[in-house]
Image (spheres, helix red, strand yellow):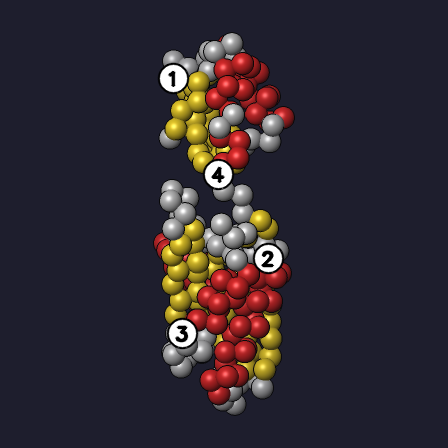
Amino acid sequence: MADLFHIEREGTCELVIRKSRFLGYAMPCAGEADARERLGVIRKAHPKATHHVFAWRRRAESDGLMSHRFDDDGEPGGTAGRPLLQVLEGKGVVNAQLVVVRYFGGIKLGAGGLVRAYGEAGAKALAAAGPEPLIPTRRLSVRVPFTHLATMEHWLGGEGLPVVGRRYAEDARLDLEVPLERVAGLPQQIADLTHGAATLEPM
């Protein structure tokens, strides 16, 4: 698999090209519903803008399949949303959305000019967000007796394995995001740490 990247924070930029103002936004994207919600926030912040163009790209955690969507929002077909998607694809970025808001300045840019303007705004916003390597993970759950809970949590912290959820009943369950490269050896490590009292289970 080619190297993939993601973003964990938002990035913005502003360009003025032949009197048109382009505001670029790059943001994490947890899925289509999240993308719509974030786009809605930007639309409300810029109600008088001429166009609100977007593209998002996502990699499914379950099977690694890619999905994407883009929209020109009234610009000529292929001149706005697709260039934003091409920025994400070209940089290998997934789980992210680009939005570019345009305030028309009265001078038409032509198809080539629009492609360059939207592409540049998207690329600069993405660069400002600081893409980082995406490490594939699998979500697993540790079932651990309360007598071993403190030891387990301390060990997980030292190993850099984040606990993303906790559930308590007759014992404790700690939900983990585990890098794929560590999955194979983890059951034995957990068994050794707790003398077989804790077990690792898929979610």
Rendered image quadrant of residue 44: bottom left
Dot 4 or dot 2: first in sequence order is: 2
Whether tag 4 and tag 2 are in contact, CB under 8 A, the answer is no
Label 3 amino acid? Asp
Dot 4 or dot 3: first in sequence order is: 3
Secondary-structure class at tag 1 = loop
Q: Which quadrant would the C terminus be assigned to in this image?
A: top left
Count the labels in the image.
Answer: 4
Tell me the number on the disc at residue 72: 3
Q: Position of residue 151 (x, y in %)?
A: 57, 16
- 109 w.r.t. 162: above or below: below
Residue sticking out furthest to the front: 1
- 12 w.r.t. 178: above or below: below
Q: Position of residue 117 (x, y in %)?
A: 54, 77
Rounded to the nearest angstrom, the CA distance separating label 1 from label 3 is: 51 Å
Can residue 34 be seen at all in this image of the molecule? Answer: no
Q: Residue at x 49, y 30 (%)?
A: 183
Whether tag 2 and tag 3 are in contact, CB under 8 A, the answer is no
Q: Position of residue 58 (x, y in %)?
A: 43, 54
Tell me the number on the disc at residue 2: none
Q: Which of marks 1 and 3 is in front?
A: 3
Label 1 amino acid? Ala
Dot 1 or dot 3: first in sequence order is: 3
Task: Report which residue position mark 2 lands on.
Answer: 129
- 102 w.r.t. 60: above or below: below
Tell me the number on the disc at residue 137: 4
Q: Which residue is drawn at 41% across and 44% down?
A: 61
Rounded to the nearest angstrom, the CA distance separating label 2 from label 3 is: 22 Å
Q: How crowded is mark 2: few (under 14 residues within 10 Å), some or many (20 or more)?
A: many
